[in-house]
Image: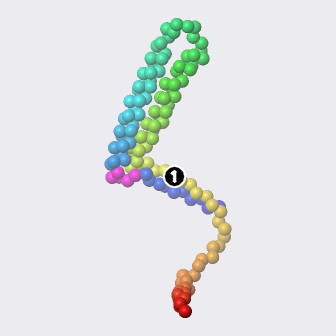
Amino acid sequence: MVHRMLLVRIGGKYVHLLKMFGALFTFGCAFNVLFSAYQLSVVVDLATWPYPVSTGDVFGEITGPIASIFIWLALMVIGLALYRSDRTVLPLEEEWEDKGTVRRASAKKPARRRSTPRRKK
């Protein structure tokens, strides 16, 4: 069994366009996280419902803003990874079985003969 680890770099030191996209994406996601948190606070403050409220009603109302907060946080982490792309290294692992000695082809291959075209009669 052979085990090999590859280190893959996403971007180089001078990839400024990718870093700019990551910064703008992170900035936009941060604003959406704040907006979702504001929506959550508005939902929690609206406790003056005209009918009796059950826990299922309250839970149903706050799950939307909470889910959007987590989605935007996950997208913000992706934006940060793009922003730090010059330092981001992804480790990839490979494993395969060694089949013993491998027969190698000879260095020189025999020359192929080209067939001659048929003559018309």
Q: Position of residue 30 (x, y in %)?
A: 40, 32
Q: Nearer the viewer, residue 74 or 98?
A: 74
Is 6 part of what is drawn in magenta? no
Residue 18's x, y, as percent?
37, 47
Is residue 35 positioned above or below 7 on the image? above
Q: Secondary structure at mark 1?
A: strand
Image coords of residue 77 (percent x, y): 45, 38
- The majority secondary structure of the magenta stretch comes to loop
Which quadrant would the N terminus be assigned to in this image? Answer: bottom right
List the residue tagged with mark 1.
91
Q: Position of residue 37 (x, y in %)?
A: 44, 24
Q: Where on the picture, by quarter, is residue 52?
A: top right
Quadrant location of the C terminus?
bottom right
Q: For the point 63% across and 76% down, which residue is it?
A: 103
Question: In the figure, 48 relative to 60: above or below?
Answer: above
In the picture provided, is 107 more to the left or to the right than 29? Answer: right
Q: Residues within 10 Å of mark 1 (few under 14, many from 20)?
A: few
Image quadrant in which you'd find residue 57: top right
Q: Colour scheme of this structure image? A: rainbow
Residue at 48% x, 17% y is 43
Q: Which residue occupies the foreground of this view, 8 or 43?
A: 43
> Which residue is pictured at 48% across the width and 36% down the height?
74
For badge 1, the amino acid type reads Pro
| Range shown magenta | 11-15
**Residue at the far bottom in the pictured view:** 121
Number of labelled discs? 1
Q: Is residue 111 visible?
A: no
Q: Is residue 5 visible?
A: yes
Residue 24 drawn above or below residue 113: above
The residue positioned 58% from the left and 57% from the top of the image is 94
Q: Is residue 12 magenta?
A: yes
